[in-house]
Amino acid sequence: MGGEGRESGSLWGYRSMVKLPARAPSPLRELIRRALMAFGLVVVNTLIVYLDRGSYSDNVNHDGVSLVDAFYYATVTVTTTGYGDITPVSDHARLLNAILVTPLRVAFLVLLVGTTLEVLANEGRRALSDSKWRKRMRNHTVVLGYGTMGRSAVSTLLRQGVDKEKIVVVDQGSAAVAAANRDGLAAFEGHATSRDLLNRAEVPKAREVIITVNRDDTAILATLTVRQLNPRAHVVVAVREAANVALVKQGGANAVVTSSDSVGRLVGLSTVSPELGSVMDDLLSAGEGLEVAQRIVEKDEVGRNPADLDDRVIAVVRNKSLRKYYDPTCAELKAGDEVVVVRQATRPGPELPPE
């Protein structure tokens, strides 16, 4: 999918289809395989003629059919050239040509036009896999932008147990799309603000949309487009400048992360207090050391004070409302509450290779 509209001339009428993780065969290996197949057809045809050479007539030299003659006859036969200088004369030889040599000739012709047939078959398979993929894609996560932030977000999702098959990447760079495929993710190549492309990524059926594009104006427009397509999805947006946070929230984002401010605060903490900076970096790096997590309150924790839990509770989510751990209303946990905790990371989860 080489950019928005790149496939507008596709045989099947798709402007862009999902790129599913796949292992492409080596062109050289495929060429060698086809050459060996073609040579094998010629050899089989040669053996058929040579082993029954007494039933063939050389109408030019009249000296019988040698191995070279049999090879010559096989080549002109499978290529449908047919000069007529060597011909089968007995009934059984002609019958063998009809039931054996003719299928070999057809197979050779199919092999010669195999490239065209393969293109058609690949287009058909892609259209079929694209259709099947769309039918099963519900309540998934769409990541717009697969740069450093996007890859880190996906890595965190995977560590939290999100299935790779429930993550879809959209990026306008072919290298980023290829990287997503290598990481086992379905991906589309195109602009994050394209309504057509977002529809093909099944954004209207998505549960979450993460926007980590490299420009704030693109992030704002992408947020507006996503919100128009899906009013119910949980939309998280990363922007570089704090001045754009209000615009993104007005566009419909549920959460906005300011990358420049976040990095700046971490740098400041690391400068003033290196140990505190290391702890904060550890908390943000899921899968090792300490991690921040959100979980449902377990049955044996109902009625207890957050301070009495084994995990260090820093917030309680009750009826979709976030409350600090010291809020008096959270002195006793209730069934259905969720707690935000700091704990030792016990499940590293899958890692994505570095960008």
Image (cartoon, rainbow, N blue to C red):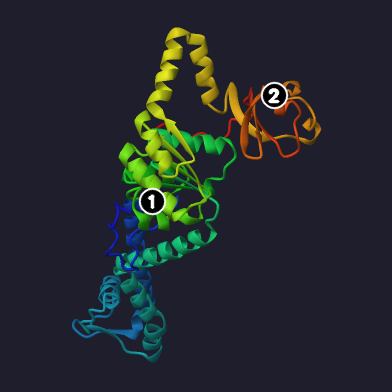
Amino acid bearing label 2:
Asp
Is residue 93 something that shows in the picture?
A: yes
298 relative position to 110: left or right: right
Nearest the viewer among 348 and 307 is 307
Total tally of numbered discs in the picture: 2
Q: Secondary structure at mark 1?
A: helix
339 relative position to 63: left or right: right
Is residue 241 something that shows in the picture?
A: no
Q: Going from the N terminus, do you reach mark 1 or mark 2 first?
A: 1
Pointer 2: what residue?
Answer: 311
* Residue 148 image offset from top left, x and y in percent: 39, 33
* Residue 115 image offset from top left, x and y in percent: 31, 65
Examine the rendered structure and indicate whether residue 182 appears above or below residue 119: above
Give how far apart the Cα atoms at labels 1 and 2 are.
40 Å
Q: Residues within 10 Å of mark 2 (few under 14, many from 20)?
A: some
Pointer 1: what residue?
Answer: 225
The image quarter in which residue 62 lies? bottom left
Q: Secondary structure at mark 2?
A: loop
> In the image, what residue occupies the spot 53% across and 45% down?
164
* Residue 103 image offset from top left, x and y in percent: 39, 78
